[in-house]
Amino acid sequence: MSTNKLTGAEIVIHSLHKENTEFVFGYPGGAVLNIYDAIFQLKKFKHVLVRHEQAAVHAADAYSRSTGKVGVALVTSGPGATNAVTGIATAHMDSIPMVIISGQVPTHAIGQDAFQECDTVGITRPCVKHNFLIKKIEDIAPTIKKAFHIAKTGRPGPVVVDIPKDITAEEAEFIYPENIELRSYNPVEKGHQGQITKALELLIHAKRPMVYTGGGVVLGDASESLTKLMKKLGFPVTSTLMGLGGFPASEKQFLGMLGMHGTYEANMAMQECDVLIAVGSRFDDRVIGNPDHFLSKPKKIIHIDIDPASISKRVKIDVPIVGSVKSVLEDMLVIYDSLKTAHDKNNQKEWMIQIESWRGKKSLDFQNSKEVIKPQYVVQELHKVTNGDAFITSDVGQHQMWAAQYYPFDKPRRWLNSGGLGTMGVGLPYAMGAQLAHPEAQVACVTGEASIQMCIQELSTCKQFHLPIKIINLNNRYMGMVRQWQEFFYGNRYAESYMDALPDFVKLAESYGHIGMQIKNPSDVSSALEEAFSIKNKERLVFLDFLTDQTENVYPMVPNGKGLSQMILAEDL
Amino acid sequence: MRHIISLLMENESGALSRVSGLFSARGYNIESLTVAPTEDPSLSRMTIVTTGSNEVIEQIIKQLNKLIDVVKVLDLNDGKHIERELMLVKVKASHQYREEMKRISDIFRGRIIDVSDNTFTIEITGSSTKLDAYIESLDKSAIVETVRTGASGIGRGDRILKI
C-alpha cells in the first residue's frame, strides 16, 4: 500500500474540505460507514447529526440560504436517500445551492434489489439541478468539484452525488482539480447591453413604472445594487415571498409583498402599471394569480433572470435580459447615469399619488384583542423584541404569511422559508442551519402547531448542539391555511383540518431539555418574548406556545385563479 | 405544430432518461425519439419529434438547454432540413399476393430484404409521411408486423449541429 494513496472515503472528505465545507449535516448508515469513519479520523469539518435525513437536507439548505455558501448533507442509501428527497425538492424549487452526498450499495449489488438499495439518481432526477452516480474511485474528486460548481453557478440548485460503498473503500491518489470546464454548461453572467439600455429607456419614460423583485435578488447577492438603482429611479418596489429583504422594507418606496397574500397597494400597482420590471422573479401562480387577468391591463414587461427558461414561461416578456441579476443591475446603474437627464420624475408623479391612496387602505391592519392573542400581534412584538434584526424561519401556512407580512426585513438572507415547494416541517431545521451558521445571531422559528410536529424530533439535535433557537408556535389548534380555504371555498366544512390530541408543548420542550412556555393572554405576549430573548436565556432554546385566535384569517387574499386586483380584504367582511 | 428537434448530449448513462423525464414531467408530447452515439463517441445525437404551440416549443428548447448534459439544441423547423425514417414491414406474401406486394414496395422504393414462403420483409426509408402513406396503401390484413425507427433529421446545406 503506497502511503500517498487515500481511500475513496478519505477523498470525499478531502474534496469537501477543498470546497471550504464548514458543516456537514447528516445521518450515518451502512452504505456511508466508510465515509463516517473518515469523518471521525480526519476531523476536517463539523458534522451535525440530525434525527431524520429530511432535517439534514433542510438544515444544510438553511445554512446556504443564510450565508450564500453551498450547503452539504450526507445520507445513507435507500431510506436515507428517500428521506432526503423532500429536502432536496424543497431546495430545488427555491434554487438553493447544495451538494447532497448519498451512499449507495456496492457496485456489484446495484440492480440486485440489495438491502437498502434504491435508484437514488433515478428518484432524485426530477428534483435536482444535476446528479451523479460515481462509477470509479478516480471520479470522486472531479465529480465533487463539478457538483459544487454546478450547484453554485448559474441558477443555483441542489446536486446529488451517489457513491457506492465499495468505491469508498478502494484506494487512489487524491488529485483535486483546480478548475472545471463543462462544455455543456456555460451559464450566462453578463446581460445584453442593448437590451439593458432598451429596458432603462422604457422605464424612465414610463408613466406608471413598477418593480417586482424575487428570490434571485437574494440568491444573487444583488440587494445593494438593487437598492442603489431603485434610489436613483425612485420607483415603487414590491417583492415576492422569496425576495423579502432584497430591498429594505423600511424604505418608503417599498409596497410590501405582492401576490396571493400581498398588500393592496402592491397588487394594485402590479395590475395597473404600464411598465413592469421583474428582477430575479418568475411570475408564478401565487404571485400574479391568473395570467390572463394580469395581462388584461396592457403593460410592457422587462424581465431580468439568470435562467432563460424562466423568461416567457407564464407571461410573454417584451424585454428579456438573461444574466446574473447583480451584473445586470450594476450595468443598469452605469447606463442610467448616461440617461438620467432624460428621466423626468414628474412623469411618475400622478402614479406615486395613486399608490399612496392605495396604501391608505392599510390592508394589513387588523383588530387587536384584549381577550385572545392575535397571531399578527405576536409577530409584530417579535419584530420589536428582536429589533427587526433576527433570522426568521417559518414553516408553511398562515403563520408563514403573517411572518412575511408583519416582520419587515431590511436585510437579505434573514427570511428563510419554503416558498416554492411549500414544505411543512422546514422551520425548525432551517433555524438549526441558520443558528449554526450565525452562532451569535438571534434566530426565531415562526411556526404552527401542525407544521412544527413534522420535524419535532429535531428538538433533540438542538439540545445536542446547544442551539438557542426561539420557537414561536402560533397555536390555533387548526391547520390554519387549510381551515381558511375550507371556510372561504368549502362551505365551512373543516375536513380533517383540526389539530386534535396535541402534545403539551411545554412538557415536550422540557423533556428534550429545553425551556417551554405557554402564553394565553394578549397582555403576556410581549413579556414572554422578552424573557425568551433575554440574556438569561441566551444559551437556551425556548419553545413559546402561543394559544392564538382560532378563527383568524390571512388578508388580503387573492382567491386561486383570480386576478391580482380581485382581493378579499379584511374590511370587506 | 409538429417540430423536429435535434440535440447533442454527453454520451453518459442516464442521459436519455433526463430528456424523456423532462418531457413527461412537464407534460410535453413526444411523437418519436431516436438516439445514438455520433462519430465522436463522447457525444450522442438525439432527434425528438414533438408537437406544441410556439410558446411550448420555445419552452421545450429552453428546458432542454437547461439540462446539464445537453451540449447543443437545434429546432430543425427553424430552417430547411431533411428528415428520414426507416421502417421494416413484414407483409403476407403468399402465392396470390406476391406480385402485388412487390409492385407496391417498388412504387415506394422499398427493398425486399427477407423472403419466406408466406412473407416478405420490406425495408423502406423516407419522411414519416411517406411511411404513413405506404402503410395506408396496404390492405390492413396483409400487414403482419411493422417496426419504425422514428425520424432522424439534419439541416440542409450549411446549417449544422456540431460542437
Image: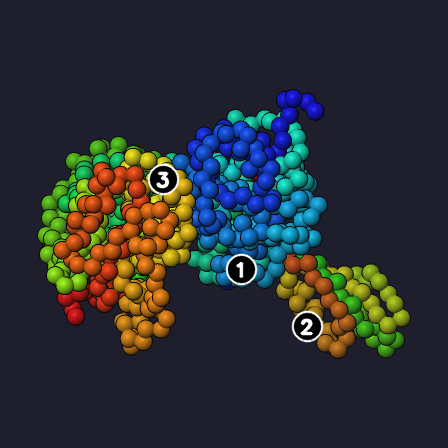
Of all chains, the one bearing label 1 is: B
Q: Which residue is mark 1?
A: B24
Please say whether residue A201 is visible from this viewpoint.
no
Q: CA distance from mark 2 to mark 3?
A: 75 Å
Q: Position of residue A237 (x, y in %)?
A: 22, 47
**Residue shown at 33% from the left, 47% from the top:** A514
How many labels sit on residues?
A: 3
Q: Tell me what residue is drawn at x 35 percent, y 41 percent.
A: A467
Residue picked out by circle 2: B136
Residue located 32% across and 76% down the image: A493
SS at circle 2 = helix
- Residue tagged by mark 3? A466
Verify CB contact (< 8 Å) between mark 2 and mark 1. no
Viewer-nearest of discs 2 and 1: 1
Residue at left offset 23%, top offset 61% = A548
Neighbor class of circle 3 (other Cα within 10 Å; few <14, some 14-19, many 20+) is some
- Looking at the rendered structure, the kind of residue marked 3 is His
Camera-side residue of A118 and A500: A500
What amino acid type is highlighted by mark number 2?
Glu
Q: Nearer the viewer, residue A312 or A458?
A: A458
Percent of width and height locating residue A143: 56, 36
